[in-house]
Each structure stands twice: as structure tokens, then as C-alpha cells.
Amino acid sequence: MAAGYWLAGKTAERATFELFVRRLPENRNFILAAGLPQAVDYLLNLRFSEEDVRYLRTLEQFARLPEAFFDTLRAFRFTGDVFAVPEGTPLFAGEPLLTLRAPLMEAQLPETYLLATLGFQTLIATKAARMVEAAGGRGVVEFGTRRAHSPGAGVLAGRAAYIGGCLGTSNTLAGKDFGIPVFGTAAHSWVMSFPTELEAFRRLQELLGPATTYLIDSYDTLEGARRAASLGKPLWGVRLDSGNLVELAREVRAILDAAGLPDAKIMATGDLNEYKILELAAGGAPIDAYGVGTDLATSSDAPRLGAVYKLVEMEVAGERRYTAKYSEEKATIPGAKQVFRYAHHDVLGRAGECPAPDCEALLKPLILGGKLVQPLPSATEARARARAALDRMPKKLKSLFECDPAYPVELSDELQHLMEEVRQQARVNGT
């Protein structure tokens, strides 16, 4: 497409694209925006090396292109503008996470990367927020890298889960790169590598001191709890990874208390998700923290977000043209937009509308003329924003099931008027 735009002489035309979600995933009443730093880093550093150019020239699709096109790639830099909602902001169907305005070729090229990084991290942050809500004040730790779709996805899942409210991650690289607290426990292989379970526990305590968390279900869970308790302090607590977690947690709690360890914590793991966490909490299990892997790092019940990146307007020779699709179930709304957030509803309006004094315009300038114009918040700051926003959100929207009615998102009068104008023009032009 970039080559086609170049050949068609469209390189001076400016395009505005919006990245949004048409429909919320199953049983979701909102999504939690995440992934901006990676999107920004990509845009500001997008280059075509000589090696890249040599490869592209070997492709049949580019065989008819003159050398001047490849010179354009060698000189490529992103010079456009980006407006985005801050990470940790809850959004609803149809509301843009990001608006990008740039020369057409520059605006088209980042589509796949932006959809991938914003879509994935938003999906995982949303999933984490659900699990934290189900835990009802008890901690949730992301443990999913080994089941993520790639090692890189595991790192970003750890980051997104932290923004969504998790205490931290087991992924040490995510901790290093993003300043996220890291947690972890020894595996069953640690226990089995020693002649006795008690020796394995003693060696672990020598290593970790007050951070010690014993995995006690390698053989007999209750005997494991007694052996761990016999070592006394220092320790953080124990981990249960199998069996009837409600009953075992109660019995293990009694063992720890009887040994004078009332401050020792119990962590539960083992194929957990938000629904199982909700059941454990409802059953009164004395569990202090949950470690969640597969279901969190892959959002296994809703593993795709369905974000789209759509052209909404063009500027050609100083004239603005608004664009929209009218295909069934995939229609789009023309024109660059702004999300105006009021206390109890949102209004999707045109980008140039003046906000009312009692609302917040969510899309903020981030890149102007190819330059970053404001520092990006850290993952910790994004997490705090998410927590504050979720605390203000109506409780029904935080349900693990779809609520009816959904959060109201209205269209402004100006946007509705533009939609009708563009549709009428399309009828006249036969498009």
C-alpha cells in the first residue's frame, strides 16, 4: 500500500486514522487502555535500514518500482501527530484509544504494530482488572509467561497486568524494564531435587529469608504445611497449587496459626481465573493472594480484542474529505473524534468541539510533528490512574458478566450532523 500511494502521487495527502474497538469482548463492560509506550517508541524509531531495503527489493511485489521509492524508504521518518487516551483509562465500544494524523504513507505503515501492541496490552489489562475485582482486596500476581504466546508477550503481559491492578509479576525482565514488583516461588522440581521435603524447605529459607514461600503440595499438602511451620520464621507464607483449595486453605491456616505463625500468608495457584477466584472468596477460603498464569497472560476466555484502525478523514490540496464505511456490521463514523467524559456518561464528538466545563476530553496530544510533546507516565502511574478510574466506576460495570444497560456513550449533535452529510454525499456520488 505504501508503494501504491507513492506511485499514485498521494504522498502529500494527509490522513487521519483512529484505533478503536467495535464491540467489547465477551462478558466485558469496559476495556482498560494500555500499551502506549511501546506504540510511541515504535513510531519515533521507525526506520528502514539498508538491509531492509535490500530484502524488499527481492520481493516480486516490488519488482516494478523505481529506485526513488526505495530512497523514500531510506529517508523515512514519522512526522505526524498522535492523540491518545492515557494508559489506565477505561473505554467503551467505539471510543478511540488513539488518533494518528500524518502523510498518508506514514499513517498507513504503523497499522499492524499499533493494533498488535495496543490491542494485546489493553486486553490483558482488562482481564487483570476483572481478576483484581473478583479477589475483593486480596492480592493477585501475574504468573503467566510460561503459557504466554511468546517470551515477548509474557513481558508485556506482566506490564499490562500490573496496570490492571495486579501486585506484580513473576517476569523478572518486566520488573527490570518497567519498574514492576516481582514475585515468585520455587517449583515442585526444587522440592523433588532434595532427599526430603523438609531439607528443601530449609534450604529455601536459607536463601530467601522473609521472602520465603513454600510450595507445600508436592506430596501431602497438610504434612507439607506442618513441615514448613516447623521451621518457624522468617517466611512470607505457603503456596497451594492443587486440590480443594477452600478446604485445604482452612486446614493449612489452622496449622500455621497453631505453630504461632498467624502472619504467614497463603497463596493459591493452579489454573485460576476470575470466576474461580470469585468462588474461593464466596466460599470463605482464608487465601491472602492469588497467582494467576494461563488465563491472565492469554485472556483465554476472550483471547482477542478485535481492535480496528480506520481512515476517518483526508486532507488533499488543502481540502478536507471525510471518509466512512457503510458495510453491514462494519460501518464507521467519519471525522476525527474526541471522547468527552462526564460523571455518568460519555459523549463521542468531533475533535474540534469545545468541551463542557463538567467533562474531561480524554484524547490528549502525545506526538506533534513527529516529536514527543509530553512525558509518558510510568507503569506505576498508569496503574494508579486505572485504580482511581475503576473506583469511580459504577459497580455493575465491574461485574464479571455483561450488564444491561451498558454504560451510555452518546453521539454529539455535531458528529451526528457530519455523519448524515457524509452519507448523503456518498449517495450522490454512488459510493
Image: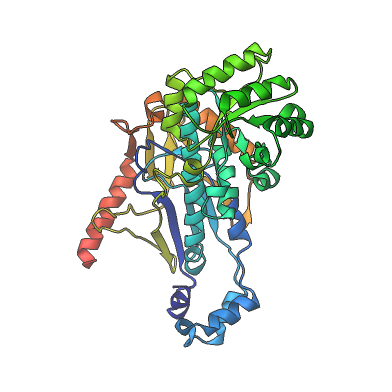
303 is higher (above) or lower (below) than 246: below
Q: Is residue 324 left or right of residue 197?
A: left
Residue at 43% in and 30% down: 276
* Spot occupied by residue 75 in the image (x, y as percentages of width and height): 62, 74
Whether residue 324 is visible, yes or no, is yes
* Spot occupied by residue 171 in the image (x, y as percentages of width and height): 63, 44
Q: Nearer the viewer, residue 287 or 18?
A: 287
* Spot occupied by residue 330 in the image (x, y as percentages of width and height): 29, 55
Residue at 50% in and 66% down: 109
Question: In the picture, which quadrant includes the N terminus?
Answer: bottom left
Number of marks in the image? Answer: 0
Q: Residue furthest right?
A: 206
Q: Is residue 338 left or right of residue 404?
A: right
399 is higher (above) or lower (below) than 42: above
Question: In the picture, which quadrant includes the C terminus?
Answer: bottom left
Q: Nearer the viewer, residue 257 or 163?
A: 257
Examine the image and state in which quarter residue 199 appears. top right
Whether residue 71 is visible, yes or no, is no
Residue at 49% in and 58% down: 101
Residue at 49% in and 43% down: 294
* Spot occupied by residue 144 in the image (x, y as percentages of width and height): 55, 44
Q: Nearer the viewer, residue 414 or 393?
A: 393
